[in-house]
Image (cartoon, grey):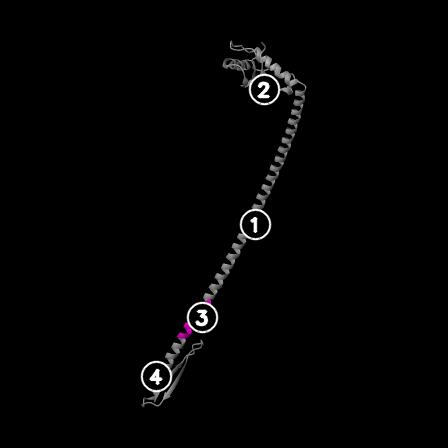
Amino acid sequence: MSATTTLTVDLRSSRPARARVVICAGDGQPAAEEATQRRAQEAAAAGRAAREQREADQRAERAAAERRRAAEDAEAQRRAEETEARRQAAENDAQRQAAEREAKRKAEAEEVRRKAEAAAEAERDAALQRRLAAEEEAGAAVSAGVMDEYRRMLAQTIERSWIRPPSARAGLQCTLLVTQAPGGTVMDVTLGACNGDAAVRESITNAVYRASPLPAPRDPRAFERRLEIVFKPTE
């Protein structure tokens, strides 16, 4: 009689494999030998089943460890993201506050500038009004003959300083454009229309500089920095 061992393994289950021994009529081997072989086969099958069970348990432990690590990593990632979100929110809030402070500073500076411009504009308007009033008063003075009197006085002063050159002839008449500083100091002299020769023109120009400083008008409102004087010396 001989024994045939059939090992049945269910791969979907973690239970130990089952060994089935089928005893068949053989060629007359002794029963003891067959029993020994059967026990050896059963022991080998049980060893393999135990080894497979250990390997399955180890795989399960590794899978569980991997799941734990994955969960720990996910938790660490979540905490890191929360920390980054709090940091970003704090940074955004700080930037917002800084922007608000800068906007407030600019608004205050703009208000100061606007007020300064308004004050300057008001001062310009006031200065214009004062100048117009002064010009109006000056016009009144001119209409009263003060300006004509002032020009005659200047022409007489220049004539007294004039050294007549030999080429000067009767009927001499020259237009002088005189620039003076406050106080009467002559700054510039230009001759306009003049019927004298070069020597006469030069002598008149020198006479204006010698007459500096020019006398002040009787009415200070008649003073002008740029004067047009007609020089007509007496014969």
Which range is magenta? 51-64
Instruction: Of the two numbered discs 2 and 1 on the same chain, state the one appearing first in sequence.
Output: 1
Instruction: Of the two numbered discs 3 and 4 on the same chain, state the one appearing first in sequence.
Output: 4
- What is the magenta segment's predominant secondary structure? helix
Q: Secondary structure at mark 3?
A: helix
> Is residue 99 visible to us here?
yes
Q: Which residue is mark 4?
A: 37
Pointer 3 with pointer 1, Cβ within 8 A: no
Vertical order, 152 against 82 (above or below): above
Q: Residues within 10 Å of mark 1 (few under 14, many from 20)?
A: few
Q: Secondary structure at mark 1?
A: helix
Q: CA distance from mark 2 to mark 4?
A: 150 Å
Q: CA distance from mark 3 to mark 1?
A: 49 Å
At 56% across and 50% down in the image, what residue appears?
93
Q: Is residue 60 left or right of residue 177?
A: left
56 part of magenta stretch = yes
Indicate the amino acid at tag 2.
Glu
Instruction: Of the two numbered discs 2 and 4 on the same chain, state the one appearing first in sequence.
Output: 4
At 34% across and 83% down in the image, what residue appears?
37
At 63% across and 33% down in the image, what residue appears?
121
Q: Which residue is mark 1?
A: 93
Q: CA distance from mark 1 to mark 4?
A: 83 Å
At 64% across and 17% down in the image, what residue appears?
148
Q: Which residue is mark 3?
A: 60
Q: Observer-nearest residue: 75 or 142? A: 142
